[in-house]
Structures are given as C-alpha cells and as structure tokens.
Image (cartoon, rainbow, N blue to C red):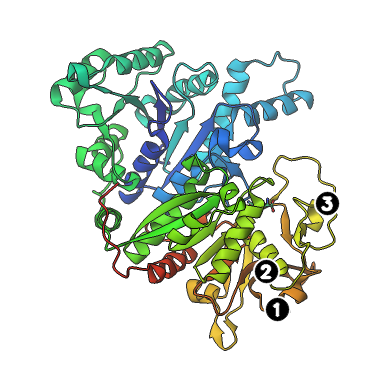
Amino acid sequence: MAKPKKYIFVTGGVLSSIGKGISAASIGMLMEQRGIKVTMLKMDPYLNVDPGTMSPYQHGEVFVLDDGTETDLDLGHYSRFVQNAQFTRKNSFTTGRIYDTVIRRERAGGYLGKTVQVIPHITDEIKSQLRAAAEDADLAIVEVGGTVGDIESLPFLEAIRQMQHDEGRANCLFVHLTLVPYIATANELKTKPTQHSVKELREIGIQPDVLLCRSDRKLPEDVKRKIALFCNVPAEQVFTAIDCHSIYEVPLFFHDEGLDEKISERLGIWAARPDLSAWRKMVRTILEPQGEVTIGIVGKYTDWKDTYKSLNESLIHGGVANNVRVKTEYIDAEEVERGQRDKLAEVDAILVPGGFGERGIEGKIRAVEYARTEKIPYFGICLGMQLAVIEFARNVCGMKQAHSAEFNSGGAENVVDLMESQKGVTDLGGTMRLGAYACQITPKQGGKPTRAYAAYGKEQISERHRHRFEVSNSFRSRLVEKGLVVSGKHVNPQSGIDLVEMVELEDHPWFLGCQFHPEFLSQPMKPHPLFAAFIKAAKEQAKDGQPGLKGIR
Ligand code: GLN
C-alpha cells in the first residue's frame, strides 16, 4: 500500500505580519532536513487571479517561479528555506483562481444542471488543487493566507477542515500561529488573544494540534500550560516563536524547542534527526560577520521593505558568501533627481532594482551615471539594467533622446523598447515575459573573462524574468561599438530570437546589468553568483578597508 500523504496546515491568528510565512517555511526546512520529500503551498484569500496585477505597495513583492507563475512573496520564503522542492503554478493559488476555474467550468456545462455553491463546489475545487500540489511529495505544508476570523478565508478553512476527514485525522496536522504580547505595565505575557483566536478556529471545526506563539521572549512553562488548558492543546505542543535577529534563526529555534520532533511524532513520520550544522554556520556568518558593506538601493518604494523582499534576502546571501554584513541604504530616486548626491557618495556600491512606472526614472539614471563615472560598483536588475543602457546611450554614445518606450512611447531613440511579442497586448494579467529563460554567457571580452562568466563560472544559465521591455536590437551595434559589453544573451536560432540579457562595462570595478531577476534564485545556503560577486566588489570598494562591526541589528 502506498504511504499515506501527510499534510500540515498552517493558519494564523490575532494579527497579520507575525511571521506565518517564515514559520511555515521553517517547518518545511526542518522536515526536509529530516529527509522528508516536502512541498509547500500558499492559498491567498483575495479575488485577484494572481498577485501579478497588484501594486507591491499593497501586497509586497510579486515572486516569480520558473514556469512564469506570479505568486505571493511567501513562495520566496519557501524557496529560500526548502532547498530541493520545485515550486510551480500548483503551489500558489488565490480565491480568484478557484472561482475563475469553477465559473468557467459552470459556463462550459461542467456541473450538469446543479446549483453551484461555495460548499461543496468551491471547497471541492480547493481540495482538488491542494491534492494536485501535494502529488509528488510525502508531506505538503499548506499555508492559509489571511487571519482566522476574516470572512475571505472561510472557504479555505472549511476545505482544510474537510481534509482531515478525507485524508484521515492521523495524516493532517493543524498548526496555528498566534501572538502572545508582553505587556510591560503589567509585567505579564498575555494569552487572551491566543485563546480567542483558537476559539474562533474551533468554532469552525478545526482543533489546532500545535500552537506557535509569537513572542518577544520564551514562554515560561506556566504560560504554556495556561494556553494549553484554554485552547485544548497538550502543553508540549505549545511552542514559542521568538523574535529573532535573522529570519534564518527561526528554524533553529524551533528545532531546539523540539518542534520537528513533535510534528514527526504526531504525523507518524519516521525520520532521522536533521543535521543542521551547515545551516547553523550560515546563521553565524549572518550574525557575526567579519565586516560590513553598505549598498545604496535607488528606488521609489523606499518605505516598504516587503517590496524588495527577495532582493534584500539575496544581498544578505551575498554577504554570507563574503563574510560581511550587508547594510542597505534606501535612496529615494526623486531626491537624486533633484540633484542630491551625498547619499550616493556614502555607500560602497549602488543597486537599481526592478520597477515599473515613470516616477523617479531620471533620478535612477543619474545614480547610474554617478556609479559609472565615479567607478562605484553598480548592479542593475531588470529596470536597473534598462536604465544603465539608457544612461550609456545618452552620455557615452551621445544619443540625447535615448529612452525606454515604457516612458517615451514612439521616441526616436528608444534603446529600450517593447518586445515584439508584447505589441498589441492589452490584457495585463500574466502577459509579460515571465519565468525561466536560458541565457548564454559570453566567456571573454578583451582577453579577460567577463564579469558574468567570472561570477557564474559557466556559459549556460537559466534565470527568471518579469518584464515587458527589452534592449532594442536596432541600437545594439551602436552601443557595443562604444564599449557596452553584452555578456549574456537569450538566443534561439530557430525563431531568430536574440535578446540582450546582461550588459557590463570594462575599465570599471564592477558594473553589470541583467534583464532577469537573479534575486528569485538566491538561497542562503547557495548565494546567487551575481550577488556574491557584487558584494565582493562592494567589499573591495569599502573605503576604510576594515569596516567596524556596528552591532547586530
Ligand atoms: N518596467 C520594465 C519592463 O517592464 C522593467 C520591469 C522590471 O524591472 N521587472 O520591462
């Protein structure tokens, strides 16, 4: 008989943003390290079919998978914590997609005259998508977006309630993350919000098995016992989810509290104790590095770190590769546009990340110019590469009107232009150049390895994309003549496609732009080669040679 599939359902209570994604990812990491074949998935309760059309202001970063699916940023956490799972479209779905599927089926006559209802048709569709995602794994960790008590997530909760009967209670584990705040004036940890949140969950028929209690301190035994009593959970299944300096400490803390051991026992999974030594070493490098570099990130979503979640993590990984702490300084592109240069002058390297829309564009172009002419390491990602090409065209090739069709449609010198495949596209959902594409690296330039080759150490790579515009081939030879090095290309001899994927400059400490998003592939245990190389260049740039440690954040 086939081994029964196991499911862990992770719900959140009390508040949003208390770390449900990181907690789920940490469980995934620990179970994978125990030798279990793990997959993870996220169900989001909003009506957008995917987050691709949502502003990152609203929802944080849009994370992109190899197959081109635009997903919630939690898929990014999963990808960084769980090292061997391949995530696809199946691993992330929204209420919008569920309804879209059900309604299309209804229009096609798929329900044979029945009244189509939330229960059972929507819940059946949720369960069937859950099972499809879990297909190739032994254990599926399912994160339910939103907070228990929200109207929107009720169908998801109802579906997972039913799953325990369909799959067998012994094969399902309900993990609930809550908040246990410390109230200074009372000198007390307060359990009431947890009690209420579990009560709410039990009212809809879900009895949590494990409680993860987010707190700024370790829960004492008596507090755990109190929570256990009021929430109908054994005290040894109440765990602290403590605030950590680095998110990568979270699984280590859970492990030390015995969480993965308890999960394995409850699910009847025979598994070895995990060897976490390499992970611990990585965390130590993050917490106790040998130096520090400061990276200036020039952007417009300057006030929300979630917008650049994967980017921030990738920079940390680049720091791990070089044994330095990476401090990020957000520089408002509009300030640079108004002529302020002081912040640019203070950083060891400059990065212009991906982005959409016109605001701040000229400031970003000036930041590129500053990096190019002042010989400060520069990394341009997607939009950041396009702007590097525009800057080069304007200031080196003398093309004064050089621009991108995104901001100057119909311009005479649009060195960045709409891709052929994008012309005439009016549907904005999922229509960009999305997902993994092969890239061929130019190994040498002027007798020396290109920066790209030096970083990757190979000629064939694959990277993920999310953009509508490209370097225009009509201007490519003019740019190359003046010294722009095309160090990566996507070519397809059959279709004649030949696209610029990476550019760089000679006679510069480190100047590289890439049309793809390397931040979607970086892992703390395997820092992405471009981030490792960029941070290395920043480290060499760090003016005082031996930057002091400024304490753990
Ligand atoms: N806005 C640019 C484009 O669509 C860049 C996109 C990005 O940086 N992800 O091509």
Mark toward the start of the polypeptide (2 vs 3): 2
Q: Tell which tag, 2 or 3, sits nearer the viewer.
A: 2
Q: Amino acid at mark 3?
A: Lys
Q: Are marks 1 and 2 in contact (CB under 8 Å)?
A: yes
Mark toward the start of the polypeptide (1 vs 2): 2
Residues at marks 1 and 2, CA–CA distance in whole angstroms: 9 Å
Q: Residue furthest bottom?
A: 447
Q: Amino acid at mark 1?
A: Lys
Report which residue position mark 1 lands on: 482
- Circle 1 crowding by C-alpha within 10 Å: few under 14, some 14–19, many from 20: few
Q: Tell which tag, 1 or 3, sits nearer the viewer.
A: 1
Q: Residue 423, which numbered label?
A: 3
Report which residue position mark 2 lands on: 392
Mark toward the start of the polypeptide (1 vs 3): 3
Q: Position of residue 229 (x, y in %)?
A: 21, 14
Q: Is residue 415 above or below residue 204?
A: below
Q: Are marks 1 and 3 in contact (CB under 8 Å)?
A: no
Residues at marks 1 and 3, CA–CA distance in whole angstroms: 29 Å
Q: Position of residue 195 (x, y in %)?
A: 30, 14
Image point (72%, 60%), residue name: 470
